[in-house]
Image (cartoon, grey):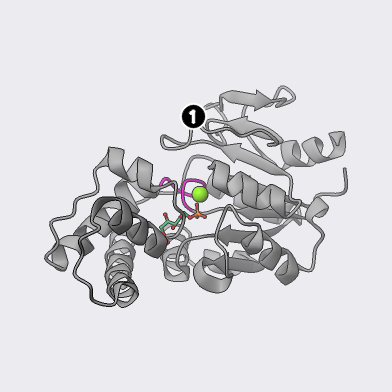
Amino acid sequence: MSKLKALIFDVDGTLADTERDGHRPAFNRAFAEAGLDWDWSVELYGELLSVTGGKERILYYIDRHRPKLPGEDVSEFVADLHAAKTRHYVRLLEEGGIPLRPGVKRLLGEARDKGLRLAIATTTTPANVMALLEANLPGGASWFDAIGAGDIVPAKKPAPDIYRHVLRELALSPENCLAIEDSAHGLHSALGAGVPTLVTVNGYTADQDFSGALLVLDQLGEPGAPFRVLAGQARGAAYVDAGLLCALFAAG
Ligand code: XBP
Ligand code: MG
C-alpha cells in the first residue's frame, strides 16, 4: 500500500455521535414549530437513517408515512422545514450539546503533528460542520485542508461523489488517504472512490455490514480506555493513533 498522506473524516456518527440526540430532536423541534404532529422516535429515526441527507430523509418519511400531505409544492415545503431544522441543530451545537467522540480530538492533533493532512467528507449541511467544530475545537475548521459537505455534490453517500470531490480538493490519490467512517453508506462511498476505510461504529450502525473495511472498531479509544476490535487486525494496539494508521498502511 502507498504512503499515508491524509485522513478524511466523516462527521455524523464519526467525529461526534450526532444523530440520536442532535439531528433527531432538531427535526422534531422544526416539525413542532411548523405545527406538524410528526415525532421521530429513536426507533423510527433508525429506519429513516437508511436515507442520507436531511431533506431526502423528510421526503422519504412523507412518502412512507405521510402520503396525504396537502398538494402544495412539496420540495419548497421540505426545503423550508429543513432550513428550520438546521437552525435548531446549530443552536443545539452552540449550546454545547454534542461532544466529539473519544479519541477524535487527540487523533486530529497527532495527525497534524505527524504532518498528515486532514479533510472532511460528509452528507450533512456545511453550517452543521462548522458549528460542531467551533463548539468543540475553536478555530479547528482551519485544521482541515478540505471540507466537502451536503449539497456540494449531486449524489450523497453511499455514492462516491463526496469523497471524489474531497480528493480533488486535496489533489491526492485515494491510495494515499484513509477514510474514517461510522456507517455502511459511508464505507461504500469511500470505497467507491478507492479510499481505504477504518470504521468506528455507533448505536445506529453496529449491526451493519462493513465488508471491505481495513478495521472495524467500537470507537477510536484513548490511552487507558481501549477500543474493541469488531473486525480486522489492530496489531496489538489499544487505541487508534497516527502511528497505528501509518503501520496499517505500511502493512499494505
Ligand atoms: C449523515 C447524514 C446527514 C445527517 C443530517 O451525514 O446523512 O444527512 O443525518 O444532516 P454523514 P442534514 O454521516 O455523512 O456525516 O439534515 O444537514 O442532512
Ligand atoms: Mg456518518
The residue at the point 47 percent across, 51 percent down is: 12
Q: Amino acid at mark 1?
A: Asp
| x and y percentages locating residue 185 in the rendered image | 56, 47
Q: Which residue is mark 1?
A: 207
Residue 189 is left or right of residue 47, and the answer is right
Quick one: quadrant of the N terminus? top right
Mark 1: few/some/many CA within 10 Å (<14, 14-19, 20+): few
The residue at the point 56 percent across, 24 percent down is: 228
Residue 226 showing in the rendered view: yes
| x and y percentages locating residue 3 in the rendered image | 86, 49
Place residue 75 in its image quadrant.
bottom left
The residue at the point 30 percent across, 72 percent down is: 74
Asked whether mark 1 and ligand 2 are closer than 8 Å, the reply comes as no
Seen from the viewer's position, the closer of residues 172 and 133 is: 172
Place residue 143 in its image quadrant.
bottom right
Residue 13 on the magenta span: yes
Asked if 133 appears above or below 25 in the picture, the reply is below
Place residue 81 in its image quadrant.
bottom left
| x and y percentages locating residue 190 in the rendered image | 67, 51
Seen from the viewer's position, the closer of residues 187 and 177 is: 187
Asked if 42 appears above or below 166 in the picture, the reply is above
Magenta segment, prevailing SS (helix, strand or loop): loop
Residue 209 is left or right of residue 33, and the answer is right
Residue 206 is left or right of residue 168, and the answer is left
Seen from the viewer's position, the closer of residues 145 and 111 is: 145
Give the residues drawn in magenta, as a range: 12-17
